[in-house]
Amino acid sequence: MHFTDTRPSEPSQIVRHTLGYPRIGAHRELKTALEAYWRGDSSQQELLATGRQIRQQNWQAQQEAGLNMVTTGDFAWYDQVLTMSATLGHLPTRHRSQRSDDGDDIDLDTLFRVARGRAPSGEPAVAAEMTKWFDTNYHYLVPELASGQTFALSWTQIIDETREAVAAGYTAKPVIIGPLTYLWIGKSQQSGFDKLSLLSDLLPVYKQLLQALVDAGADWVQIDEPILTLDLPGVWHKAFEQTYHALRTVPAKLLLSTYFGALDENLNTAVNLPVAGLHIDVVRAPQQLITVLDNLPVHQVLSVGIVDGRNIWRNDLEKSRDLLRRAYDRLGARLWLAPSCSLLHCPVDLREETALDRDLLGWLAFARQKLDELTFISSLLTAPDSGRARQWLQESRDSVLARRQSSLIHRPSVQQAVRDINATDFQRHSPFADRIRKQQAHLSLPPLPTTTIGSFPQTQEIRKARRQFKQGELGVEAYEQHMQDHIADAIQRQEVLGLDVLVHGEAERNDMVEYFGEQLDGYASTRNGWVQSYGSRCVKPPIIFGDVQRPAPMTVKWARYAQSLSKKPVKGMLTGPVTMLQWAFVRDDQPREKTALQIALALREEVRDLEAAGINVIQIDEPALREGLPLRRQAHAHYLEWAVNAFRLSAAGVSDTTQIHTHMCYSEFNDIMPAIAALDADVITIETARSNGDLIQAFEDFDYPAQIGPGVYDIHSPNVPEVDAIKAMLRRMARKLPIQHLWVNPDCGLKTRGWPETEAALQQMVAAATQLRREMGLAAG
């Protein structure tokens, strides 16, 4: 079901805007252009032209939806935090190429060297650390902070694009990351370093930037400070006061933007800052609206994030209207409407979806439709008796009712299975110390066993075969033969390389979540529902719309075939229940933990079938476990309890000799180590390459009881690691962790790499492990 009209017909006194818009393009044009440029298949001018086209399309979409201003500064060539670092002249010296002519050593390739470790120009260098943006699946490049750090306005992209929008006739509202959030998310290698010591040097550059944006034609500037929804130390509250009193000297109207949660104890700090407006998220925290209204200064605008910027469900217009009525009555024109956060986290346009179930389609709204919803909600407040407002309201009511009553959603057998779960379902038969002895005897692995995380390069041949199969151009038998050929090739390459535990390479999988979503009841897949994960990496999250169950085995035939090709153990590869939840668009009509248990039960069946098929090593990936941690400490315990239980439920149904692995990457583990240990996995593989091994510190300090595979090289960079560097990292690990507990592996899956660099890197990795065994006098076998 769709709204019959998406264009506003009457002016509204409520300002409508968006905090950001997807930058990948309606058909991933940015991804295509970036990768062509990195390969050397297109010029930088062609890449720049693609960027201009995407920005113009985005601004036009916002204007057509009736927004009062368009957002600039939300476009990034790789990541908005990286863009901000470049703007502030704050990029690592190892990535910068000195130029003597004008002293300007930051250009577009500099950004790519920071992000990827390599660009079409300049010398390769270790890429910057990458981690998750708050509790989302978006990855950002971590600013590297150090004492004596200097800042200078150095990269004018945000300014230039604001000027570009103004020249095109738009009212532009640039968005920048606020100085306190920028420092908070940065990281220093110096022990005890005080991030706030850099504030006095940072603020003059922010003043310059704000003045430049005003000079470029901006009246309002959105300044994002999402850390105001976190538990902040008192010194940071004082820093907010200092910062925004310093910035008030610039003649820009600042819209202080918060999202992903409630202000709570940060409310007084936020409402007392000398800014012209405040944005709050009432999708995540509707309860805060009245409190903010009661404390908002009379001169400030209140921007209310009423449309969900992180999920794809159609807005309940009646519910939104009822929530906002008091705000509109009290604020009038001082009330602004917006999505809860940037629409970066949503697919671009629902009109691209022509194959979804018609009922399901009527329950959804992508980024473009969410802009329209702002107009609908505005009209319900300003002109509630108009014919269009009544029509939109009735259509919304019909959609809400249809979804609530739909037979697509509810499966009594699944709900009963969740009720039947008992305490023993979460427990392995024996403790780890007993299991690992049995597994070592059964698997006969050498010390420092080598393996990979799961996926191997998704070649053009693989993608072509999958595309032809989905389009009906390739029959089932022919397609499966193609996949078996690629699996056999991957097994043979690993045998030649000398890896100890093999993987089948996941040739048949499009994505680690979408692949399973396509085979589970209760999930739906889109045709073009892409969102950016980082850089040119886009994912197509499936939609969990109903109760989840497994109608048939999903991976068993591929794993059984791969194992038949080798006498070495071949891992069964699954995506864990929390990641299946986090990396999907999740139903919002029941608690997330209930959905997680449904997924865990489906995976438990798959794990048992893999074991029955002779698969003795099974990896259940949970890279999203830390990502799902609530932003407020008071909510941690509840989340970790059900997240750990979901994993254990999926894994605990096997015998002691079956070895359970899990994988996590690009997260800070220090604050959840007890929960990671409670997963009771036999082996965990983690990312440590980009962080120079620092993440292993959490496992050292906690005295992690099970086996660990620290990622010894960065798969997101095309650079091939050196044997000595890998050995040095492993020796560092062995100083604090039992050598018999260490595995050797890359830091993530290899699907985005090509075979030549993959084989070269793995050859170095195996050589490092082999040499280290000999040098340390470790017996093989």
Image (cartoon, rainbow, N blue to C red):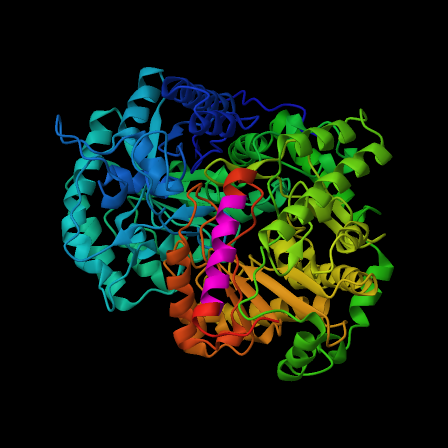
Q: Is residue 485 above or below residue 435?
A: above
Q: Which residues are magenta?
A: 759-773
Q: Is residue 547 magenta?
A: no
Q: Residue at x 73, y 77 (%)?
A: 656
Residue 325 vs residue 261, the one in the foreground: 261
Q: Residue at x 25, y 68 (%)?
A: 191
Tell me where residue 183 appears, x and y as whole percent.
Answer: 28, 54
Q: Is residue 519 above or below residue 620?
A: above
Q: Residue at x 43, y 62 (%)?
A: 668
Q: Kindly indicate the quadrant of the structure image that contains residue 194.
A: bottom left
> Position of 212 compared to 384: left or right?
left
Q: Is residue 768 magenta?
A: yes
Tell me where residue 123 appears, x and y as whole percent.
Answer: 30, 37
Q: Is residue 176 above or below residue 190?
A: above
> Position of 627 compared to 280: left or right?
right
In the picture, which quadrant includes the N terminus? Answer: top right
In the picture, which quadrant includes the C terminus? Answer: bottom right
